[in-house]
Image: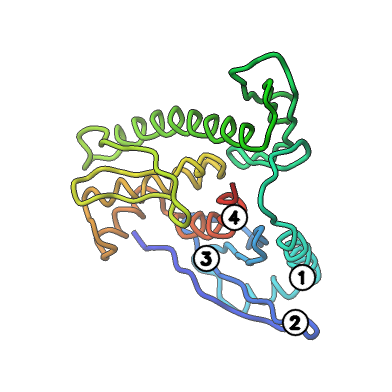
Amino acid sequence: MEINRTIMQTLSYGEERIRYQVCHVPDREGKVAIHVHPDGSVQVDAPMDTELPEIKAAVQKRARWVMGHIEKARELREYVLPREYVSGESYYYQKRRLQLKVVRSEDAKGSVKLHRGKLMVESSDVSPARVRKLLLGWYRARAQDYFSRRLKDITARVPCLAETPEWRLLTMKKQWGSCSPKGVLSLNPNLVKAPRECIEYVLLHELCHLQEHNHNPRFYRLLTEQMPEWKSVKAKLDGMSELLLNE
């Protein structure tokens, strides 16, 4: 199976230079797809047989649209400030953008729930420290449940895995996951904020390390067998990392 390729390219748009990552994706049909991620990076997914000049022409044709989204991403990043844990802030769960709603109640224990596109936090103590603790607990609980189910499902379909490996949640500043020499997986609970295909990619990546601990050709062949489009998905996750890791 051919491994999908990524190539960095640039084009001029007025006084700006647009850098974009080309991902040649196996089994993709039709036209190229252009994505501008929250960090302002540009990703172009294209069928395997699409030549670079054709891809560049497609990006050039939509350069105004691309530049507009890059500028919006730059503006938003200027306002990526430390969390205050107050109503109105935006949070993510499996790609969904949710608005935080903090409500004072008689509930001393406190609770978090999804309600009509909002992340509702109810507690008798609505201090930032308490709201933060409740939210982190909610994300960990969601991650524990979702990762457990997905790891079980993935293990069942990967021939080289006899059983679901030992794993744990570990908050990391820059990593989504890791695999220890003893085969124990560590998964960042913040990963549950990402789109489901991105979660799937990270789980598969770490599971493949149970067979090949290093990033050698055998490792990438194994990963590609399970997710042919993994480079495109990885690029999407990389483009969202700064936003999703902001607690």
Identify the amino acid type marked 3: Cys
Which residue is identified by label 4?
Answer: 240
Depth check, front residue: 141 or 204:
141
Residue 29: percent from left, percent from top = 56, 56
- N-terminal-most mark, 4 or 1: 1
Query: Residue 23 has which mark?
Result: 3
Residue 226: percent from left, percent from top = 36, 47
SS type, badge 4: helix
* Whole-number angstrom distance, CA of label 4 to CA of label 2: 23 Å
- N-terminal-most mark, 2 or 1: 2
CB within 8 Å, label 2 to label 3: no
Which residue is identified by label 1?
Answer: 67
Viewport quadrant of the N terminus: bottom left
Using a 10 Å C-alpha cutoff, classify the residue at mark 1 as few (fewer than 14 neighbours), some (14 to 19) or many (20 or more).
Answer: some
Which residue is identified by label 2?
Answer: 16
CB within 8 Å, label 2 to label 1: yes
